[in-house]
Image (cartoon, rainbow, N blue to C red):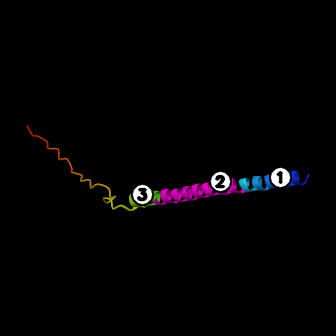
Amino acid sequence: MSYILDALQKAEYEREMAQFINNDIDNKGRRSFLQTSFWLWITIILLMNILLFTVLLWPKKNLTAPQVHIIATVVQQVHP
């Protein structure tokens, strides 16, 4: 009877250790994925901000209306 209880306790201990090891591996993989994803999103947001500020703040031509010159037409009357 003692041998059976010892074997059951050993099996239970080994099962708990296997679960602990598997959970530790899963957490490390998930953690690195989340960290990579986080830094990827931060990089994308920063690049979009740089692009947006570059487009908005780039020097442009003056936004003044074009000059219009009005020339009066002269109608000459021809005297016969």
Amino acid type at circle 1 is: Ala
Quadrant hosting residue 9: bottom right
Quick check: is 55 in the magenta stretch?
no
| Mark with earlier residue (3, 1) | 1
| Quarter of the image with the C terminus in it | top left
Q: CA distance from mark 2 to mark 1?
A: 28 Å
| Mark with earlier residue (2, 1) | 1
Amino acid type at circle 2 is: Asp
Q: Nearer the viewer, mark 2 or mark 3?
A: 2
Q: Report the side of 2 relative to 42 (left or right).
A: right
Q: Which residues are magenta?
A: 20-46
Residue 8 is situated, as x and y percent measured from the top left of the image, at 84, 52
Q: Residue furthest right?
A: 1
Q: Report the side of 51 relative to 20 (left or right).
A: left
Residue 39 is situated, as x and y percent measured from the top left of the image, at 53, 59
Q: Report the side of 1 relative to 40 (left or right).
A: right
Q: Decide: few, some or many residues near mark 3? Use Cα within 10 Å; few <14, some 14-19, many ≥20.
A: few
C-beta proximity under 8 Å, tags 2 and 3: no
Q: Secondary structure at mark 1?
A: helix
Which numbered circle lies on residue 51?
3
Helix, strand or loop: magenta stretch: helix
C-beta proximity under 8 Å, tags 2 and 1: no
Quick check: is 44 in the magenta stretch?
yes
Amino acid type at circle 3 is: Leu
| Mark with earlier residue (2, 3) | 2
Q: CA distance from mark 3 to mark 1?
A: 66 Å
Residue at 39% x, 57% y is: 55
Q: Secondary structure at mark 3?
A: helix
C-beta proximity under 8 Å, tags 3 and 1: no
